[in-house]
Amino acid sequence: MEDDLKLSMDAWVRNYIAEFRVAAARNASQKLGLLASIFDDFSAPCQVHLFWFRLEEPPVDYAVLLCTRVKNLPDDLVEVVGPISPPQIKNKLLEVVRWPRWEEKIKDPGFLLPKDASLGLVIAGHLAQARESFQRYLVTQLFSEQPRDAWINMKAGFPGNGFIWEIHGDLRSLNPEETVSRSFQRPQPASALPVQTSKPKVSIEGYGTHFYPQLWVGDPPSPTPEDVISGKRVHAPPIGLSAKALDMTYEGKVLIIHQDGFVGLEAQTRREAMETLNEIMGTMFLSKIPATAVRERELGSVTIEPESLAVATRSSELVSLRTAQAFGGVGPPIQDDVQFELNRISGRVVPVARMRDVVTRAERLSRNAIARSHLMFLLEAHTHLLSSEYRQCIVMAWLVIESWLEWRWLTMLDSKNLPKDRRDRFASHDPWTAELRSETLSLLGFIDPTRLEKLTAIRRRRNRVVHSGFNPSKVGAEEAIKLALEVAQEGPLGRS
């Protein structure tokens, strides 16, 4: 029985690859200009491994399809591993990652990989996540009243120009020809387009990622008293299947936030999306919600349906702990063993109303150039602190303190009603350095002695970092960011 299942899945995969290559050849020969996504490209050379997890009764299927382009493996290699029943998963995956075919070292500048990482090590990471994702998917299906048809839940890149699919349901139920046809963009010549009597519906394009550290937006899954007594493990829905928590506009652009912490934003470029999302992340940090700065490479493309504002498609690559959430999450589930974990998650659950307030405040802060710069530098300093990058943390924190000092100095000058030429002389940085300004403001009573002492110590520490390569302690970095946060909230950041 198991062999028959394996053979039928093997036949489906081979048929799909053949259909794809026929379609690609037809497109090329007819010069139709059709393009396949990089996450759908089964052109030669490539190898395909399908890891198939299956609960026999009631039937629940889950699979991970891995397409690689490894030089020492043949192009026609197709291997189905499975169906693997839940009790067999650990031992079977241990067997798979030890295969000699995975010994080749792999390098790809587009991915954050350990030094001298083997293909087996990278695959082991994906399979470990697949095992956890299957367990979560299994829970949702066992308690689902209406089983869904099979669908490809996630597509993502894999080092070495490969890619991975995550499939929910029995892959064999999908029609290969129809699935292949959706892999190609099919542009029509302008003359063939029908006359539009109304504005066409165009998907909203943008970029997205997850909040990190991981959090939950809205009401979390809650256990029953019976769950607590029995010690039942209550999990959130699998990553990628959670409901939308809220949708709103941010500076005229659509913003979508899911319960599992996925956030998508309408944007033309990754840089635009990164800058806007970091305004939100910085405001979360100000609001004492755990958050770190988003990096450009952590953003995947997103398409949003214009009417429902639902995320139609999204992509992600495994480049950091933030993006790992798209492949099944990182760390413990949102709510793990309910006997002991009920209180621990309180700091990682954000009510929808509070998240909406954060986004509204971020949009307001972004309109003030000084407040925005303080916000971004604080977020960077905090991110560096969490990464144990204490030099960078102190430099970023000092930028906030120095900018606040400039604002405080100019505010003091304006309060004196000085003639313009005299005010301009005092406003100049020559000779009015940060040191002279802070000492003068202290003498005039605008900075108290305790703050002056802290400010002077941090300024000297920053100078040692920049000019001598000094490596400060964690305590020194924490003191810098604490003062930066304190003064920033007294300035434009706290008044916007």
Image (tube, grey):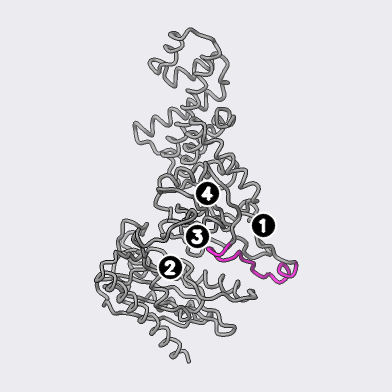
Q: For the residue marked with disc 4, what is the amino acid?
A: Val
In the image, is residue 65 above or below residue 277? below
32 left or right, relative to 49: left
Query: Residue 191 location, x and y as percent?
Result: 34, 60
- Which residue corresponds to mark 1? 219
- Which residue corresponds to mark 2? 126
Task: Give the number of the disc on residue 325.
Answer: 3
Label 1 CA crowd tier, 10 Å (few <14, some 14–19, many 20+): few
Give the quadrant of the C terminus. Answer: top right
CA–CA distance in space, label 2 to label 4: 32 Å
Given residues 345 and 244, the one toward you in this image is: 244
CA–CA distance in space, label 3 to label 2: 12 Å
Given residues 450 and 299, the one toward you in this image is: 299
114 left or right, relative to 205: left
CA–CA distance in space, label 1 to label 4: 23 Å
Q: For the residue marked with disc 1, what is the amino acid?
A: Asp
Quadrant of res 340: bottom right
Quadrant of res 384: top left
Task: Give the number of the disc on residue 284.
Answer: none
- Which residue corresponds to mark 4? 254
Q: Mark 3: which secondary structure?
A: helix
